[in-house]
Image: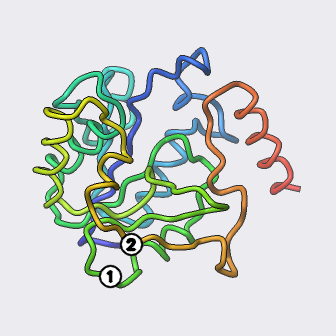
Amino acid sequence: MNKNITCIILSGGKSSRMGENKSFLNFGEKTVIEHIIQLMKSIFSDVILITNTPHEYQHLAIPIFEDVYKQMGPLAGMHSGLVNSKTEQNFIISCDLPLMSREVIDHIINYKTNKKITICKADGYLQPLLGIYLKSLIPIIENILTNEKKHSMYALLDRVNSEIIEINKLAFYNENVFLNMNRPEDYENILSKINLLSK
């Protein structure tokens, strides 16, 4: 159980393309958010949730915080997580990644680096919503949120020299772990992967 890294789960999206809150979609015998929380609690002693609809998540018995900067996307959610974290190192994960594996998480959190951000590159794409972010990034993020027109995660990556792990080169990598859920067809695809794994 890792006591030196806080896990920050981001569940602040509007799920407009899905048509309903994707965090509460069924994932086996649990909902997506219940599955992710259970996995995170098996790795980290401190797990917090960031959402702008906290009343929907009260039944989960987990510390919940809202964005300080509203309507500014996942970077604002990360900011709130870092502000409310009690540790310098923080593991960020989006609720969009229900197939994420413990092997990938363990590799990221144990990767030795002196950089403030550690994320993966999988199949040619950066994966900024899964990785280690230091609390000392708060002033940089606040500057982006208050002074920049674009508030994307990539605005932060452009400013900070980050550790990029080429995850798909590792033996344990599974191409399904970064499948995310934005649309109903994404959810159906993920369910099909679960069914295959259970056979």
Depth check, front residue: 181 or 28: 181
Residue 22: image x %, image y %? 56, 28
Q: Is residue 47 left or right of residue 17?
A: left
Residue at the extreme right: 199
Q: Is residue 56 toward the left or the right of residue 72 in the image?
A: right
Q: Is residue 17 above or below residue 98?
A: above
Regarding mark 2 in the picture, which secondary structure is present there?
strand
Q: Is 117 placed left or right of 15 in the picture? A: left
Residue 144 position (above or below residue 53):
below
Residue 81 in picture, x, y percent from top left: 24, 46
The numbered mark, 1 or 2, whose residue comes first in the sequence reads 1
In the picture, which quadrant includes the C terminus?
A: bottom right
Label annotation for residue 95: none
Displayed quadrant of residue 7: bottom left
Q: Position of residue 157 (x, y in %)?
A: 34, 55
- Please report the residue visible at 21 percent of the width from the left and 34 percent of the height from the top: 148
The quadrant in which residue 27 appears is top right
- Which residue is painted at 78% across and 39% down in the image? 189
Mark 1 lies on residue: 113
Number of residue marks: 2
> Amino acid under label 2?
Glu
Q: Is 65 rendered above or below residue 37? A: above
Binning the other alpha carbons within 10 Å of mark 1 as few (below 14), some (14 to 19) or many (20 upward) gives few
Q: Is residue 89 above or below residue 110?
A: above
**Which residue is label 2 attached to?**
163
For the residues marked 1 and 2, what is the alpha-carbon distance in whole angstroms?
7 Å
